Image: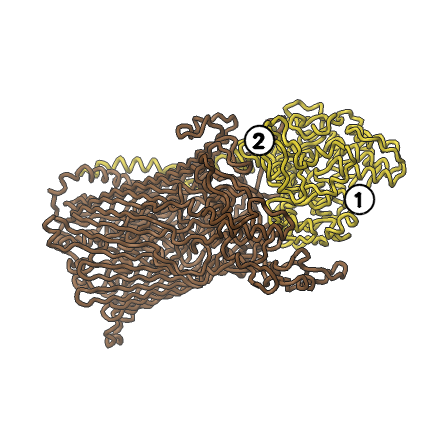
């Protein structure tokens, strides 16, 4: 029979084919590594550390929402946008009538904890890797800096938060809020340890530009002390940064936010971005979104969505002839982009305040197919901020000379007359004024008002109530799944 | 490959050599059958004298089917969408193969019923059963000598009890069914001018809910059988000619012999791990022995929108816009100062729709049964231009099914389908870029183009000019599908039959998108062109063997079947995007032409495997008591080594009451049968590898001005996850009365899903992007289904009326330990629309509750609460003004109440059909209805928007203009600075009930003498209308919404049901056609 002729070799072939199929159901994942194989080598340690930085560069929690809360929820800016309904949740925050389902506070909470998790993975696993010990210490130091950075963002937004310092097991996922002091202590510890091992900015090769530095760790530590009114410690750390001679003020204030001056002399810590035209969203995107959010709705090039509209009150804060006003606020008729021949005048008719924000505006040279993907770095800490911390700490400690020196260094850069008062209260007010105009629309104002205790006075008309609105509500989703969490008064 | 101890019951079959041998034999057989085609007509063996009906039954219905993984669910976790994306860019075309619908070419030739009856062939019924192909129906009866005697005089009977029905791994007589199975005939499938087989099931089967997600050509439909079985994928398993297939939209409806839908667990448990959402069994056509027919079917038609939006004219819009500006203390726009000069303005819906787009189909098939060889060969072409410009579908199909009876005990055969679909997509990507959204939202004052033909931007808002969207959308998806089987049947003895089948399902999806460089306005431009290409290859290999045994001992009839199956699946995806082409012309719309230096390249590969053992025992005592027991054991690579095996048993019994002696006097009862069954099924539709923790790459950062790679863990695997399990009970009744004129089938079911795979909300402080999956959820569906058919024949006049009704109640019992509600369906930066919570049905609408409009400032001032913080009395809506919506604050906490404001689940669904024939004339009418569901009408968020930023619906002319003018929350005041009235609230939720006249068709078949002269067996011409009319209160473009594809992503779950983001409406189609047989 013909059929039998086929059957015999077929049987043999099949027998061979299935002999090795005992693991038919074992399918190895493709294109990824399993947890058993990851974080065993030096190159993996570098990969895992880079992933921590990545969490600092997510465009919402870290940057857009930084000025959402810092500027819009203050007296410096109105929300703006397409209509009042655009990001209505932000308006609710601004009016201090948000509820705990607010997605803005949720994003900050959840994304900063993702960053903390990534840092914890590095801090837990990298020390046991056999590799160059200097590099190993530096990578762990970078992770500690970033962990402190994330906790700093959390503590200023929510107050005391659960303190997670290692990857948790499933039965540990729900942690009670730590006292605010414990969070500050953790931040201080991490930053002190980081400052011991991190190189100075100048010690890094150009290819590492953007990594955490000793100066960044000291600056953030000074900021943490300022927020706690630990003036002596703040003075010490900010002085260390100043004396390191690693940093100076950018000569021309208007240039600070230029692409060409990124990571420049005034830059202490910047969140790094570049634009890749081919990826607009998701993990491949390394661009920044503040530019399109704040761009004018009526711009000729790089039109934006018109958020963060400076208020008249903010504009009025500037002394006459303060060049920082033009570098911070766009008024109708202003030149929008240098070097564009046509239609370069700003039209703010879509702005409810008549003004628009300038600092993160696109540069015309930054040619991007999709403008939601800006190459501009987020200036997280710049040297002027450190100087003003130094001035504030010195004044609180009664050292008006040191205070005036730092304050007037900031003012001298923009040719503003030196402050001369030595009265502690007057000087404090002068520093407060200087912070508002020097650091305007960079996401500091609300948090400054709260730590200075001035929020009820300044924001009372917006609905701010002392003892109630200093911290934002903890996301309801977290309360729903972790009964140990106690909500903030809000 | 199969470990013997796992399936002791079928040890003999797990002998790999034995099984494998036959798959090779099958392959050989195919070739030999082809090679011998020419001379088979001369062969005439004794076996051929066997009943044609018998051999056909075994060939067509007996294809065992095996168990293979349906489509891989969504993208992996690292592609999780950024929830705050403000203006997402059009995503590359969704890479699902389901995307390309079926070309249901033309229309369905309807067999002349009278003639069919006379030809003594089993007649097609309005209800299911296996189908006498209309071509064969005209075949002279001598070719079918062995037909059952009962068939001979059954022509005008409605209930054909002896008809075979395809069930899992076999067939059974309809009267012997113990479970709930509905079958749909080829006639019903091809009658409508739809391109998708699945769409043609709409309204046909009780408990089978079919919804088109979009009216665009080539878009997928959603099929849900008996409610929604899981918050994960809830699509049924599709089995074509015995082989599980990832989707059936590649099929040509004209090639389908019958579709059986297995609904209850006693019927689906034989598919074990993948039976939980029901099983759809498709059988493609085969030639009958001795047949020789060539068919040609043609149809052509034109389409139009059945409804248009009622938007205001330019003049009206200017009046309302001015009012809104004044209310916000803003200057009135200069262009709008004189409304009466503006006239009607632009009708944007007319601008984006085509005039009379065409739909056309050609189908040619050949059926031959000659000697030992029978084959079916067909080719089909279907084309449809969508009613929205730019959308279209072209579909080509080929099919070759053959069977060769090699010897008295050995048959070899194959089925092979090839399909190629080319779809041009309209832009429905997201709420910002959708051409329909922008056509609703664009102001009527702006004209589409300026005098030079350039596309105009709006002077009033940042809405994308819809004409520009159409011009700049170049989004194509080509899908090539190759699905086939090779099988061999071996009669080991008179009562033992062996069957081996090897199946391949290969789908290749090739998508491309070109976005040109253009400048319309500052907010609508592209500085550089971009080209994106994506490919997806899904390859499935299935091998399956079954052994069937049948034995009658006096009044006892035993039937047994055991089998094994193994499936291996590989999924490969790849995409590349680059920017900057030297120009926009056609030759430059390819990656080769791009000059960008940062191309983005992505890949994603995964694989899965499934191994199974199964068996079924049927016992019939005295043709009165029927018992069916099935068992299946499945192993899946998607679960960890200790969790991968699951057991899925079922049992069902039926009692043919009408066979009892005490029923002898009730002569008007032809058949009365009571059925009851229980079964356990599973669901494994989750991504691969979730049981193990893996790294995620591309967590990159910029250092030194360059992107450097980062890798970390985003989630952690859970080695304990296992199958979702569903236990279902079904009770039913089959009744046939008055010589089969009336048929009633009723079913009631309860099905409970336990261990539903959920990602419970874990505390976010754990820092995982996605929480590990656990078997934490459970839900329940309960429901009732009724089918009522009536048939009358008076002289030459026949009429058949069919009615079906179904209802289900869906309830979430648990969402895991922490059970947090799941929010979904994000809407235009305004939060999410749906929420899935324990105690409610899946995906209910959730939002603010309104309470009329404030008429006076006094009402606003007196709407207060006591702030517990300081005891002060504060206003609940301090920012409101008269004419604004008043929200509820029943608990007096100062925060507006949010609650459940509607459900997308219908109270019931129903369908109706009417067939009439007289002489050569025939008429068909079918209706489909949905009652009691709600729709979130997202379109109204734009057109009922008091800021007048967007275009407005005519109803806004009745807005609040002063105290007492209206208290309707849908008509708040105009106010350009409106922060109050646009929240996701009950004002956007509407009743979604509808009744649609799906088909109305008139046909005429030329009489026999004429045809005989021309040697034509049959010639029928017809004319008809699809979607003639839809009765609904719903104010949107179409009440058929489906899953609301958020941001271009079909999530394939039911969490986004009923959210209308200006859904592409269904077309009304006028059609004429021809059915020719020679």
In this view, the residue in front, B719 or A293, is A293
x, y percentage for residue A274? 59, 30
Its colouring scheme is: by chain
Alpha-carbon span between mark 2 and mark 1: 37 Å
Whether residue B623 appears in this view of the structure is yes
> How many other residues sit within 10 Å of disc 1, few (<14), some (14-19) or many (≥20)?
few
Residue at label 2?
Answer: A275
Tell me which corner region of the image, top left, top right, bottom left or bottom right, holds residue B994: bottom left
Horizontally, is B552 left or right of A270 in the view? left
Kindly identify which numbered label has been placed on residue A452.
1
The image shows residue B271, relative to residue A282, as above or below, that is below
* Dot 2 and dot 1 within a common chain: yes
Task: Look at chain A in the picture and name its colour.
Answer: yellow
Residue B823 horizontal/vertical position (percent): 55, 52
Side of B57 where A397 appears, left or right: right
Quadrant the N terminus of chain B occupies: top left
Q: Chain for mark 2?
A: A
Closer to the camera, B1003 or B65? Answer: B1003
* Circle 1 chain: A
Circle 1: element type: loop
Residue A45 visible in the snapshot: no
Percent across and percent down for residue B614 are: 36, 52
Q: Along the polypeptide, which appears first: circle 2 or circle 1?
A: 2
Which image quadrant is residue B792 in? bottom left
Q: Is residue B914 left or right of residue A165?
A: left
State the residue in front, A391 or A298.
Answer: A298
The chain shown in brown is which?
Answer: B
Are there few (<14), some (14-19), or many (20+) residues within 10 Å of tag 2?
many
Q: Is mark 2 on a helix, strand or loop?
A: loop
Image coordinates for residue B575, horizontal then vertical, percent: 46, 34
């Amino acid at each position: 029979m013909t059929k039998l002729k086929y059957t015999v070799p077929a049987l043999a072939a099949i027998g061979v084919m299935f002999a090795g199929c005992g693991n038919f159901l074992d399918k190895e994942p493709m294109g990824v590594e399993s947890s058993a194989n990851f974080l065993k080598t030096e190159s993996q340690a570098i990969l895992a550390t880079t992933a921590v930085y990545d969490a600092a560069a997510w465009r919402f929690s870290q940057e857009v929402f930084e000025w959402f809360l810092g500027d819009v929820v203050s007296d410096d800016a109105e929300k703006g946008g397409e209509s009042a309904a655009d990001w209505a949740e932000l308006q609710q925050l601004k009016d201090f009538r948000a509820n705990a389902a607010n997605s803005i506070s949720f994003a900050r909470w959840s994304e900063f904890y993702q960053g903390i998790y990534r840092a914890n993975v590095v801090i837990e696993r990298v020390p046991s890797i056999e590799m160059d010990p200097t590099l190993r210490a530096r990578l762990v130091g970078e992770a500690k800096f970033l962990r402190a950075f994330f906790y700093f963002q959390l503590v200023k937004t929510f107050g005391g938060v659960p303190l997670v310092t290692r990857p948790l097991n499933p039965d540990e996922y729900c942690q009670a809020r730590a006292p605010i002091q414990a969070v500050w202590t953790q931040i201080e510890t991490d930053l002190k340890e980081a400052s011991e091992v991190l190189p100075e900015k100048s010690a890094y090769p150009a290819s590492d530009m953007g990594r955490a530095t000793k100066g960044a760790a000291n600056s953030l530590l000074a900021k943490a002390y300022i927020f706690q009114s630990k003036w002596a410690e703040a003075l010490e750390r900010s002085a260390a940064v100043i004396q390191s001679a690693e940093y100076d003020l950018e000569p021309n204030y208007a240039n600070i936010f230029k692409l060409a001056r990124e990571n420049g002399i005034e830059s202490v810590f910047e969140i790094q971005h570049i634009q890749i035209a081919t990826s607009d969203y998701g993990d491949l995107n390394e661009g920044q979104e503040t530019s399109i959010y704040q761009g004018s709705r009526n711009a000729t090039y790089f039109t934006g969505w018109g958020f963060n509209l400076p208020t008249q009150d903010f504009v009025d804060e500037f002394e006459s002839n303060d060049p920082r006003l033009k570098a911070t606020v766009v008024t109708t008729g202003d030149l929008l982009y240098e070097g564009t021949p046509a239609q370069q005048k700003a039209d703010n008719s879509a702005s409810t305040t008549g003004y628009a924000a300038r600092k993160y505006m696109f540069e015309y040279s930054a040619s991007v197919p999709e403008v939601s993907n800006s190459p501009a770095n987020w200036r997280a800490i710049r040297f002027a901020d450190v100087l003003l911390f130094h001035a504030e700490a010195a004044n609180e400690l009664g050292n008006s000379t040191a205070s005036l020196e730092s304050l007037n260094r900031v003012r001298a850069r923009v040719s503003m007359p030196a402050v001369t008062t030595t009265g502690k209260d007057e000087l404090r007010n002068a520093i407060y004024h200087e912070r508002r105009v020097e650091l305007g629309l960079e996401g500091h104002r609300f948090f400054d008002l709260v730590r200075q205790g001035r929020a009820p006075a300044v924001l009372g008309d917006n609905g701010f109530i002392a003892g109630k609105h200093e911290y934002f509500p903890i996301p309801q989703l977290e309360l729903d799944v972790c009964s140990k969490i106690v909500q903030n008064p809000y | 490959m199969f470990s013997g101890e796992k399936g002791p019951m079928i040890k003999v079959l797990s002998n790999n050599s034995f099984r494998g041998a036959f798959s090779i034999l099958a392959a050989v057989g195919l070739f030999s059958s082809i090679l011998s085609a020419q001379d088979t007509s001369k062969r005439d063996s004794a076996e051929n004298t066997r009943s044609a009906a018998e051999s056909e039954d075994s060939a067509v219905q007996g294809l065992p089917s095996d168990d293979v993984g349906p489509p891989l669910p969504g993208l992996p976790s690292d592609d999780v969408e950024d929830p705050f994306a403000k203006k997402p860019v059009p995503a590359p075309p969704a890479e699902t193969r389901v995307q390309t619908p079926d070309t249901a070419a033309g229309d369905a030739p309807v067999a002349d019923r009278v003639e069919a009856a006379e030809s003594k062939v089993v007649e097609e019924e309005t209800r299911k059963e296996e189908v006498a192909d209309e071509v064969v129906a005209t075949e002279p009866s001598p070719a079918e000598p062995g037909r059952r005697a009962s068939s001979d005089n059954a022509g005008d009977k409605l209930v054909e009890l002896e008809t075979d029905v395809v069930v899992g791994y076999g067939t059974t007589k309809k009267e012997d069914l113990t479970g709930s199975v509905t079958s749909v005939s080829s006639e019903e499938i091809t009658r409508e001018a739809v391109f998708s087989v699945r769409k043609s099931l709409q309204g046909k089967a009780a408990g089978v809910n079919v919804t088109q997600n979009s009216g665009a050509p080539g878009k997928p439909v959603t099929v849900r059988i008996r409610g929604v079985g899981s918050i994960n994928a809830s699509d049924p398993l599709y089995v074509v000619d015995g082989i599980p297939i990832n989707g059936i939209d590649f099929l040509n409806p004209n090639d389908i012999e019958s579709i059986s839908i297995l609904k209850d667990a006693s019927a689906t448990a034989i598919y074990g791990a993948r039976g939980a959402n029901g099983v759809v069994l498709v059988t493609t056509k085969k030639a009958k022995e001795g047949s020789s027919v060539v068919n040609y079917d043609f149809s052509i038609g034109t389409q139009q929108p059945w409804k248009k939006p009622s938007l205001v004219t330019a003049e009206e819009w200017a009046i309302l816009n001015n009012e809104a500006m004044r209310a916000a203390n803003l200057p009135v726009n200069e262009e709008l100062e004189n409304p009466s000069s503006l006239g009607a303005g632009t009708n944007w819906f007319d601008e984006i729709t085509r005039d009379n787009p065409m739909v056309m189909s050609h189908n040619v098939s050949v059926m031959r049964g000659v000697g030992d060889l029978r084959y079916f060969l067909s080719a089909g072409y279907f084309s449809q231009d969508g009613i929205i410009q730019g959308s279209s579908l072209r579909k080509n199909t080929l099919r070759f099914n053959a069977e060769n009876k090699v010897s008295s005990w050995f048959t070899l055969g194959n089925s092979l389908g090839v399909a190629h679909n080319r779809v041009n997509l309209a832009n429905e990507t997201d709420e910002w870029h959708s051409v329909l959204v922008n056509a609703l939202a664009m102001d009527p004052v702006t004209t589409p183009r300026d005098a030079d033909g350039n596309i105009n931007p709006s002077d009033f808002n940042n809405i994308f000019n819809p004409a520009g969207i159409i011009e700049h959308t170049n989004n194509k998806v080509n899908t090539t599908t190759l699905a086939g089987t090779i099988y061999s049947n071996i009669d080991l003895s008179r009562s033992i039959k062996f069957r081996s089948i090897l199946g391949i399902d290969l789908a290749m999806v090739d998508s491309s998108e070109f976005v040109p460089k253009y400048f319309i306005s500052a907010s609508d431009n592209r500085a550089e062109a971009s080209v994106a290409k994506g490919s997806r290859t899904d390859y499935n290999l299935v091998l399956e063997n079954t052994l069937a045994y049948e034995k009658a001992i006096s009044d006892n009839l035993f039937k047994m079947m055991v089998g094994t199956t193994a499936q291996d699946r590989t999924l490969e995806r790849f995409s590349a995007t680059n920017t900057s082409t030297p120009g926009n012309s056609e030759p430059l719309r390819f990656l080769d032409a791009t000059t960008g230096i940062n191309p983005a390249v992505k890949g994603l590969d995964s694989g899965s495997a499934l191994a199974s053992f199964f068996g079924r025992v049927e016992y019939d005592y005295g043709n009165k008591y029927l018992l069916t027991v099935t068992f299946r054991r499945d192993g899946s690579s998607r679960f960890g080594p200790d969790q991968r095996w699951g057991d899925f048993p079922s049992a069902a019994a039926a009692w043919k009451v009408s066979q009892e002696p005490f029923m002898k006097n009730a002569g008007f009862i032809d058949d009365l049968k009571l059925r009851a069954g229980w079964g356990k099924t599973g669901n494994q539709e989750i991504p691969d590898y979730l049981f193990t923790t893996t790294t995620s790459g591309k967590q990159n950062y910029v250092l030194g001005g360059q992107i450097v790679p980062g890798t970390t863990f985003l989630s952690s695997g859970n080695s304990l996850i296992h199958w979702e399990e569903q236990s279902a009970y079904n009770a039913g009744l089959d009744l046939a009365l008055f010589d089969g004129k009336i048929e009633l089938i009723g079913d009631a079911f309860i099905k409970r899903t336990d261990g539903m795979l959920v990602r419970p909300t874990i505390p976010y402080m754990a820092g995982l992007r996605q929480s590990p999956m656990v078997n934490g959820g459970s839900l329940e569906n309960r429901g009732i289904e009724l089918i009522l058919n009536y048939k009358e024949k008076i002289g030459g006049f026949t009429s058949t009326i069919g009615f079906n009704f179904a209802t289900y109640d869906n309830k979430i019992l648990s969402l895991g330990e922490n059970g947090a509600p799941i929010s979904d369906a994000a809407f235009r930066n305004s939060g999410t629309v749906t929420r899935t919570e324990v105690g409610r049905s899946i995906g209910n609408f959730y939002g603010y509750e309104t309470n009329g409009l404030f008429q006076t400032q006094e009402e606003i001032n007196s709407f207060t609460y006591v702030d517990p913080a300081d005891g002060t009395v504060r206003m609940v809506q301090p920012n409101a003004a008269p004419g604004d919506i008043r929200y509820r604050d029943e608990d007096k906490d100062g925060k507006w109440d949010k609650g459940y404001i509607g459900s997308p689940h219908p109270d019931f669904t129903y369908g109706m059909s009417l067939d009439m024939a007289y002489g050569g004339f025939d008429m068909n009418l079918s209706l489909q209805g949905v009652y009691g569901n709600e729709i979130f009408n997202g379109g109204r968020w734009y057109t009922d928007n008091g800021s007048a930023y967007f275009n407005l619906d005519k109803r806004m002319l009745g807005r609040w203009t002063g105290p007492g003018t209206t208290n309707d929350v849908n008509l708040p005041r105009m106010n350009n600075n409106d922060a109050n009235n646009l929240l996701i609230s009950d004002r956007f939720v509407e009743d979604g009930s509808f009744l649609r006249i799906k088909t109305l068709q008139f046909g005429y078949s030329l009489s026999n003498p004429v045809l005989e002269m021309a040697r034509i067996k049959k010639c029928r011409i017809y004319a008809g209308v699809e979607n003639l009319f839809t009765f609904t209160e719903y104010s949107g473009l179409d009440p058929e919404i489906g899953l609301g594809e958020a941001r271009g992503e079909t999530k394939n779950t039911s969490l986004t049901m009923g959210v209308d983001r200006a859904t592409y409406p269904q077309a009304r189609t006028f059609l004429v056609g021809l059915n020719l047989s020679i």
